[in-house]
Image: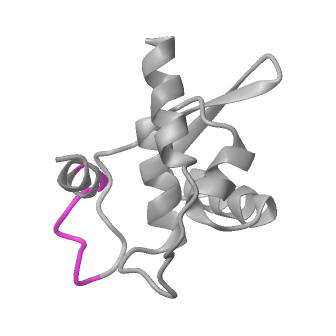
């Protein structure tokens, strides 16, 4: 399992040469997706794969936790995250779908 996690991180961390100037998902969604794929991912690794600063990751994690979308638990010097996948998405155009719908649709 540890090897799977390592392989996943390495695939996430592969340098992107043609990063688009905009995407269809927000940074909040990208952070949620990264955490759902690796609940033990470090904030600096989230920042790298999403393409934002560690400070922005810290702010987004705080907002997601305050809204109940994630729960974090400190284990030693690291954090473990759990995604509350049953909550609905926040925008009125999307609120009939859950976080789980988003995550599973992108993991196929």
In the picture as drawn, the residue positioned furthest to the bottom comes out as 21
Instruction: Give the residues in magenta.
Output: 92-100
In the visual, does 77 lie left or right of 1?
right
Residue at 57% in and 47% down = 13
**Residue at x 48% of width, y 15% of height:** 3
Q: Main secondary structure of the magenta part?
A: loop
Along the viewing direction, whichever of 96 and 27 lies nearer the viewer: 27
Which residue is depicted at the point 53% across and 25% down? Answer: 6
On screen, residue 58 above or below 34: below
Q: Is residue 78 magenta?
A: no
Q: Quadrant of the N terminus?
A: top left
Q: So how many labels did they put on this image? A: 0
Is residue 69 visible in this depiction of the protein? no
Residue 95 on the magenta segment: yes
Where on the picture, by quarter, is residue 8? top left
| Camera-side residue of 76 and 53 | 53
Q: Residue furthest top?
A: 1
Which residue does the image show at 53% across and 36% down from the upper left? 9
x, y percent for residue 54 = 78, 58
Q: Is residue 67 above or below residue 1?
A: below
């Amino acid at each position: 399992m540890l090897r799977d996690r390592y392989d996943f991180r390495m695939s996430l961390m592969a340098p992107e040469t043609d990063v688009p100037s905009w995407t269809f998902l927000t940074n909040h969604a990208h952070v949620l997706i990264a955490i759902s794929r690796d609940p033990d991912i470090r904030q600096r690794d989230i920042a790298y794969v999403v393409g934002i600063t560690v400070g922005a990751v810290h702010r987004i994690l705080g907002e997601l936790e305050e809204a109940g979308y994630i729960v974090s638990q400190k284990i030693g010097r690291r954090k473990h995250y759990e995604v509350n996948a049953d909550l609905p998405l926040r925008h009125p155009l999307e609120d009939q779908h859950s976080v789980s719908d988003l995550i599973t649709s992108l993991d196929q």
